[in-house]
Amino acid sequence: MSVAAGAATWLPAGRLLSAPGDKSRDADLRALKLSGAETTIERAAVQDLRASLSGTLLAPGDEGYETARHVWNGMIDKHPALIARCAGTADVVRAVTFARERELLLAVRGGGHSFPGYSTCDGGLVIDLSTMRTVEVRAHDRTVRAGGGAWGSHVDAATQKYALATTLGQISNTGVAGLTLGGGFGWLSRRFGLACDNLISVELVTADGRVRRVSEHDEPDLFWAIRGGGGNFGVATSFEYRLHLFDPTVIAGSVSFPTAQTKDLIEFYATLITHAPRELSVDLGLGGNEDGTPGAHLNVVYSGDAKSAGKVLEPLQRFGNPLQNTIRPKSYLVVQAWFDPPPVDPMHHYLKGGFVSDYSSGLVEALTEFRPDKQTEIYFQNSNGAVADIPQTATAFSHRHTIANMMLLCEWKERSQDEPGRAAARATWNKLTPFTDGYYVNLNDADPKGTDNNYGPNFSRLTELKKRFDAQNLFRLNANIKPA
Ligand SMILES: Cc1cc2nc3c(=O)[nH]c(=O)nc-3n(C[C@H](O)[C@H](O)[C@H](O)COP(=O)(O)OP(=O)(O)OC[C@H]3O[C@@H](n4cnc5c(N)ncnc54)[C@H](O)[C@@H]3O)c2cc1C
């Protein structure tokens, strides 16, 4: 990641010598190689690539470049040398080949929601799939195919028309690509497993520029690797998922409590989520309540039979002295957009996360001492239920026997707060790290304990497959697996 750090502005070399207002397409481009060394991309090569794409190629100075270079997290402020807005698989093949032949630093962008900003870079080429969002539902065989740049909302809207659904993330503008390749938790993962557990096939452009259908029967090694191995193995241009019958109305809402009840709430929650039926998904947040006061809240989604809802939710409805309870029937599509931030958020976001396997007394104590403020929250996304039905080594995603993904979520407005904000977050997180059991590749930046913490017992097979399919480590802006 060191090559991508720093705030260098990647302007075309020739442009510095030209009159103001000259277009970047008249100049050679300065760029960065995979090694971190500087290189020049000749104007003619840029023009050739531009002419070969059905989509758009953007360089600094081009109209649309400024908007296209921004990703979701306002903290990330990078200037790629080129952004290839691909219109289809053929464009992706050309862009991958261009990067490989020139050994260019390469980033791949689906929804752009990576917290650490892996889907962009300084000085490299960005393969941007944001216009590849077609979603095709085959209601009769309960499957859906989504383009590599689709968001959760695109897939949910299309599938819910037929009262069908599959597991996707809790924020509607998260890309299905990054989410699925790293695992994919959501309100439905206790019931239907992870997003990657519902994959039937993926169209993948590998580092050699080949387009491969990847499924249980075609390229089974790759199919194993992309279900949890993140973007390490190629560019996924489309995803085919299995769908489930799913009523468009769920029972959902938040129940919030004052800080004084936090300890009892954590203990209650730990028992509830261990024994709850799979149709019930409950997350716990220790942060500001809706009225701005510090506190704790449960976010609840019940997607089972409405007749059983009263009984299932009864312990939850009886617990403690809540400040507010908003549980009621809602559209699943509304629930999926419940916490939506803007797709490009000016707020600066920083996150630390790790799985927990139990709510030990040590963890409960550490959490009780935590004092949330306006910019900091600890959030537990439940990770049990159907996720654990699949053996640990059956897919690259290995964290199958945990109870929650614990996240420390921090945000602030000003760039001047980046350093102090990150330092404060790390200090808080250090107190929680002893209770974690592996990291979720979709959330963290570099794993301080080594990458096998991300991939567990699957790490060594992944390094072998990385060597086989991407020995050059072209796809490295991710929770990177170095080739064996
Ligand atoms: C607000 C918010 C809420 C979230 N909620 C959830 C949640 O409920 N459940 C959950 O599991 N996760 C959640 N996440 C984490 C999310 O899964 C990751 O951020 C994920 O990487 C987002 O995918 P993306 O396509 O938007 O990301 P991008 O930023 O586009 O990419 C992320 C990574 O995936 C790679 N990648 C992206 N597209 C492709 C592709 N087509 N082919 C190959 N590689 C690709 C990129 O190179 C990069 O390494 C959330 C994140 C945010 C910011």
Image (cartoon, grey):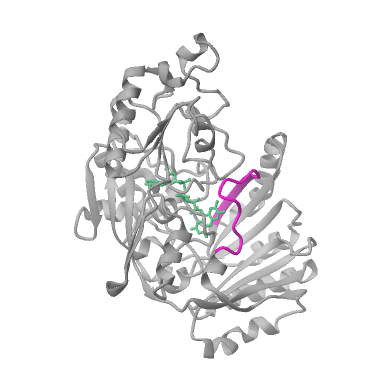
Q: Quadrant of the C terminus?
A: top left
Task: Work out whether residue 176 or residue 163 is closer to the camera in this orientation and state it.
Answer: 163
Task: Work out whether residue 376 or residue 46 is closer to the camera in this orientation and state it.
Answer: 46
Q: Residue furthest top?
A: 17
The prevailing secondary structure element of the residues shown in magenta is loop
Looking at the image, can residue 73 be seen? yes
| 414 w.r.t. 428: above or below | above
Q: Residue 243 at what x, y percent from top left?
A: 36, 70
Q: Is residue 339 magenta?
A: yes
Horizontal side of residue 329 vs 326, given as left or right? left
Task: Work out whether residue 138 or residue 446 is closer to the camera in this orientation and state it.
Answer: 138
Q: Residue 131 at what x, y percent from top left?
A: 41, 46
Q: Residue 123 at what x, y percent from top left?
A: 46, 26
The residue sitting at 39% across, 27% down in the picture is 34
Horizontal side of residue 360 vs 112, given as left or right? right
Q: Which residues are magenta?
A: 337-354
Where is residue 285, by image quadrant?
Answer: bottom right
Horizontal side of residue 148 vs 348, given as left or right? left
| 459 w.r.t. 121: above or below | below
Q: Is residue 70 magenta?
A: no
The mark tally for this picture is: 0
Looking at the image, can residue 37 be seen? no
Q: Residue furthest left?
A: 217
The residue sitting at 57% across, 45% down in the picture is 344
The residue sitting at 69% across, 59% down in the picture is 366
Horizontal side of residue 187 vs 289, given as left or right? left
| 93 w.r.t. 341: above or below | above
Q: Residue 179 at what x, y percent from top left?
A: 44, 54
